[in-house]
Image: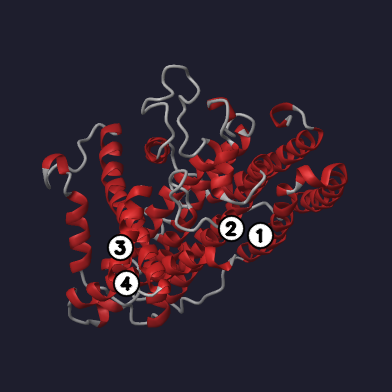
Amino acid sequence: MLATYAPVLIFMVISGGLGLVLLFIGLALGKGQKDPEKTSPYECGFEAFEDTRMRFDVRYYLVAILFIIFDLEIAFLFPWAISLDQVGLFGLVAMGIFLAILVVGFVYEWRKGALEWD
Amino acid sequence: MTALIDLLDRLIGVIGLPEFLHYVVLTSIKIVLVLVPLIIAVAYFTYAERKIIGYIQNRLGPNRVGWYGLLQPFADTLKMLLKEIVVPSNASPFLFFLAPLLSLMAAFAVWAVVPFSENFVIADIDAGLLYVLALTSMGVYGVIIAGWASNSKYAFLGAMRSAAQIVAYEIAMGFALVGVLMAGGSLNLSAIVLAQEGTSVLGWFVWPLFPLFMVYFISGLAETNRAPFDVAEGESEIVAGFHVEYSGIAFGLFFLAEYANMILITALTVIFFFGGWMSPFAGIPGLDGTFIGQSSFFWMAIKMAFFMFCFLWARATFPRYRYDQIMRLGWKVFLPVTIVWIAVEGVMVAAQIGPWAA
């Protein structure tokens, strides 16, 4: 059972190793002088105004929270979708109730304006 | 392909390694057999992109390096390898180098479960689709870490936008895949393709699941930050988004990951909706024994090439969406469409009507 996953591990190691090798080749071949102007963060030629770790729009956070809710929903839907022909009418009704509750939540978010970007 | 693998198996057997090492070496060779064509495909995808968009815009595209510019990708790679990797002074060095590695690993490792033909898939795992979803989500970490580690405002803003967009469209994508699962009845990608086997082109999932196909493909465009959803890159406002501070091959790794992801989206579209490696002419009398009537990797490659062309076509045709429009499309259009379609499909599957009458 677990043995079928072994190639996945080997694949990850090889692709990670490839990336490392490329990075090392790049670091070894691409030599240049260090210069404070050159290594300063890019800001259209200005001196950097303030710290980069600044405040950002709270709506990004909102999107992340909505994502967690709906992603969990998808995680619940997956096993149901595969076994739908076995769970029959009972499974269909159960998932219908589950989806209905989530749709109510979705409509609430929509009406509250959580999905608006401006 | 099977014959080649068998030959390799026997060749390695000659050395007489212990069973475990034998397995590792054979798998590694198989992986290289996938990765090298993939990297070449990425290289020539960039060439095709410049050439096709060039012709669409009535230009020639690259035509200096080699015949018709055919060596251009190699010149680009060489140049990227030779360029200095500038690490910004305020950056966190470890995270700065971790981000492109993470992106690349996630983008490449997904290919382990992609079935290229009936008997060539590196890891034939039962939870293949879950694995694909998990690893495509990993790509977000590369973006966020790159934006954070660069310690530059453009990179930071680009990373925030990009992450929010990827995450929003992943929902629509996931819902579309639930529909595919209901029709296919398995998480194993090979099994999903085999579920579309049978009569002919009519057995492909694209017909009963057409809205889900549209949602999936457009989400794929958004997921890979492609035009018309490329605000994360937005070269006219935030220069290049999350990888603005990356240069040389560190940028090259992001580039490789991005294009590998695009090719992956086309491969998955073909597998989920267009019968994977199956021939569209199967079942037509007279063609059955011939090359066109047979299922093979070449059919998958041809179908993938078509969708890759669509990626480029979309970029050359559509103007960029505004960010609020992108969010509206993801949450207010795609999500309701997929939920309704899942409900309809669920009833149809349970009642055994339509294409699911068993």
Contact flag, marks 3 and 2 (Cβ < 8 Å) = no
Q: Is residue B198 left or right of residue B64?
A: right
Q: Residue at x 62, y 38 (%)?
A: B212
The residue at which mark 2 appears reads as: B167
Query: Which badge, 4 or 2, comes first in the chain's sequence?
Result: 4
Q: How far across and down, in percent of the image, does residue B268 sit?
A: 50, 46
* Mark 1 residue type: Phe
Q: Are marks 3 and 2 on the same chain?
A: yes
Q: Residue at x 60, y 57 (%)?
A: B127
Q: How far across and down, in percent of the image, does residue B187 sit?
A: 62, 51
- Residue B257, placed above or below residue B316: below
- Tag 1's secondary structure? helix
Mark 3–mark 1 distance (CA, rounded to whole Å): 30 Å
Contact flag, marks 1 and 2 (Cβ < 8 Å) = yes
* Mark 3 residue type: Gly
The residue at which mark 3 appears reads as: B252
The residue at which mark 4 appears reads as: B16
- Tag 3's secondary structure? helix
Residue neighbourhood size for the residue with mark 4, other residues' Cα within 10 Å, grouped as few (<14), some (14–19), many (≥20): few
Contact flag, marks 4 and 2 (Cβ < 8 Å) = no
* Mark 4 residue type: Gly
Q: Is residue B152 visible?
A: no
* Mark 2 residue type: Val
In this rendering, the label closer to the viewer, 4 or 2: 4
Q: Are marks 3 and 1 on the same chain?
A: no
Q: How far across and down, in percent of the image, does residue B327 sit?
A: 60, 50
Q: Are marks 3 and 4 on the same chain?
A: yes
The residue at which mark 1 appears reads as: A67
Residue B94: numbered disc: none
Contact flag, marks 1 and 4 (Cβ < 8 Å) = no
